[in-house]
Image (tube, rainbow, N blue to C red):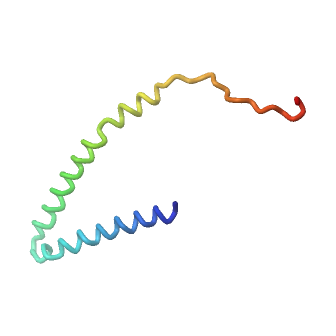
Amino acid sequence: MRSLVMAVNLFMSAISSALSQAFVGVSDDPLLVWNYAIVTILAFVFGFAFYLTHRGLDKEEDALNMVADTKYEGKKKKDESDA
């Protein structure tokens, strides 16, 4: 499990590095207007996509929090002394 988490972390770092390398050419602009504009637009688009993907989770969590408590105690083990 630890190696899987580390692999995902390194994969996300690789994607981040690739994106930053893609924007290196834009940073020649002395005012850096396009660099910040592109990052802002991408953040807005992906933020909106994240919202659309996960907008129902609060309602689902509230519904799960309202589940009634149970009186189920589970199966009791038979003691060896009772046998």
Q: In this rendering, would 65 be left or right of 25?
A: right
In the image, residue 66 lies at what x, y percent?
46, 25
Q: Residue at x 10, y 71 (%)?
A: 31
Q: In this rendering, would 64 be left or right of 32?
A: right
Q: Residue at x 45, y 30 (%)?
A: 64
In the image, residue 49 lies at what x, y percent?
23, 47
- Between 40 and 59, the one nearer to me in the picture: 59
Q: In this rendering, would 38 be left or right of 73?
A: left
Q: Residue 28: which quarter of the image? A: bottom left
Which quadrant, please, contains the C terminus?
top right
Note whether 70 is above or below 49 in the view shown.
above
- Between 25 and 30, the one nearer to me in the picture: 25
In the image, residue 17 lies at what x, y percent?
28, 72
In the image, residue 20 lies at what x, y percent?
23, 71
Q: In this rendering, would 6 be left or right of 16?
A: right
Q: Residue 30: which quarter of the image? A: bottom left
- Between 4 and 26, the one nearer to me in the picture: 4
- Between 60 and 41, the one nearer to me in the picture: 60
Q: Residue at x 38, y 32 (%)?
A: 60
Q: Residue at x 29, y 38 (%)?
A: 55
In the displayed image of the protein, which residue is found farthest to the right?
A: 81
